[in-house]
Each structure stands twice: as C-alpha cells, then as structure tokens.
Image (spheres, helix red, strand yellow):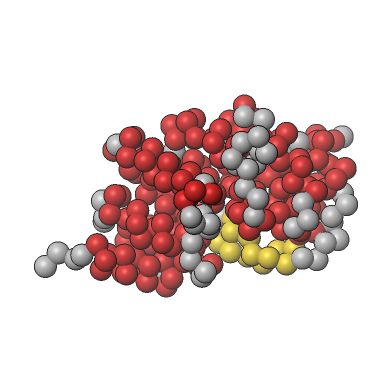
Amino acid sequence: MAVSQRGIKKGILALLGQAELEAVFTALAGYPPEKLLNPLFSGICSGSEKIKWNAVSAMGATVARLADQDMEAARIVMRRFMWSLNDESGGIGWGTPEAMAECLACHGDLAREYTKILVSFMREDGFYLELPALQRGLMWGMGRLAQVRPELLRVWQTPRYLLPYLDSEDPIVRALAARALGQLLVVEAAAKIKQSPCDTTEFSLYAEHRLTTVTAGQLAREALAALAPVLE
C-alpha cells in the first residue's frame, strides 16, 4: 500500500528529530524531491533546533536536486520562500532566510538568480525584515553564503548592507553580522567589531552541519582574527 503524503510528512518530521544529518540525507534520497517539500517547509519552522536545522540542510540538498531535474519547479520553491516573508502572507516565515540561503549555497544557478533577493531582505529600500528573530536567520544566511559564494555576495554589495547590523540592539544579530563580515574580509567592520569581544551573550550556532553553543564575543574575536591579515 502506498504511503500517503500525510504519512510521508509524519515520518520525515520524526526522522528530522531523531536522526543525525547523514542518516537524514540517506533516507530522503529515496524520495522524489517534490514529495519532500511540504514536510521540510514544516520542519524549518519547528521550535526544535534539531528538527529545524536538519530540515534547513535537507531543504538545501532537496531543492538543489529538484533544480537539476526541473529548474522552474525550484523557482516555485524560491517564490514560496519569498511569499512567506511577505507581510501579506499572514505568516512569519520562521526558518525561511536560513533555508533560502542553504538552497543558494547548494546550487549555483539558483544562487545566480536569487542572491540579490536574499540580500534585498537586508535593505530598507528592499524587502526589509524588521523582526530581530528573522534578522538572525538572515545574518546566518549571509555567513553561510560567504563560505561558498563570497564573490556573488560582493556583486550585490552585501558588505554595504551588512555593516548597519553591527549597530543592532540584538546581540545575536550583531554577532552573526560580525561573523559574515569577517568571512567577507570587510575591513571597514573591524572598528565596530572591536567593541564586542567581551559580549557574553550565549546562543546556538549551526555550522558545518552541527549545533554548538557560542558567545557573541567569541564570534567577534573570530571575525577579528579573520580580518587580521588584511588589516596588517
């Protein structure tokens, strides 16, 4: 008997909450990518950090696979991300900036088309995200893309739009902005980042497919270490 879409969703959400990411990838590879989208959209907005971040990574891999098969279908997913962050959607868009960034990190053609849209969510003359919780996701996304597509971020003037986030009232937004600016080697950020190395605000950072507890000051120090060679 074929498993219903509802049954697939229930099984995938359970998998995201229980398995390590490598096992998640292995299990999801057996499904057509279009069957995974709705469960993963539910996963990225989960209150469980394990489910959320497994879903973010799985969404990136799944949408990249979908784009290889049917680019227009992948564009529909991108538009769904954009709509969920639109005030008119009636939702909040939890996890969306992170998932969108992961998709762009995983697929070059999507990145070339949609990086400018992701950057526009930082711009007050664009699709600016006002909620600090969404800004945290966006700053994480900029850091994720800075790891793999720094030149593309520079094309869309990302450093210019990142710098004001160093003045955010939210210490986690400031820390994640500093991390992205350090990865992008933005020397203009150094003076402001030097004000934060002693910030003891703790939070969970997802990097290299694992969650670790860090402090805002730790990320500031890492950013300054990345900038040190270009400041000499």
Quarter of the N terminus within the rendering: bottom left
Number of numbered callouts drawn: 0
Residue at x 56% of width, y 40% of height: 118
Furthest-top residue in this view: 155
Residue at x 49% of width, y 40% of height: 104
Q: Is residue 26 above or below residue 160?
A: below
Residue at x 31% of width, y 65% of height: 9
Q: Position of residue 19 (x, y in %)?
A: 41, 69
Give the quarter of the image for residue 28. bottom left
Residue at x 76% of width, y 58% of height: 171
Q: Position of residue 24 (x, y in %)?
A: 38, 62
Left or right of residue 18: residue 5 = left
Q: Residue 226: in sight, yes or no? A: no
Left or right of residue 112: residue 185 = right
Q: Is residue 122 above or below residue 44?
A: above
Q: Position of residue 151 (x, y in %)?
A: 61, 30
Q: Residue 41: in sight, yes or no? A: yes
Give the quarter of the image for residue 142. top right
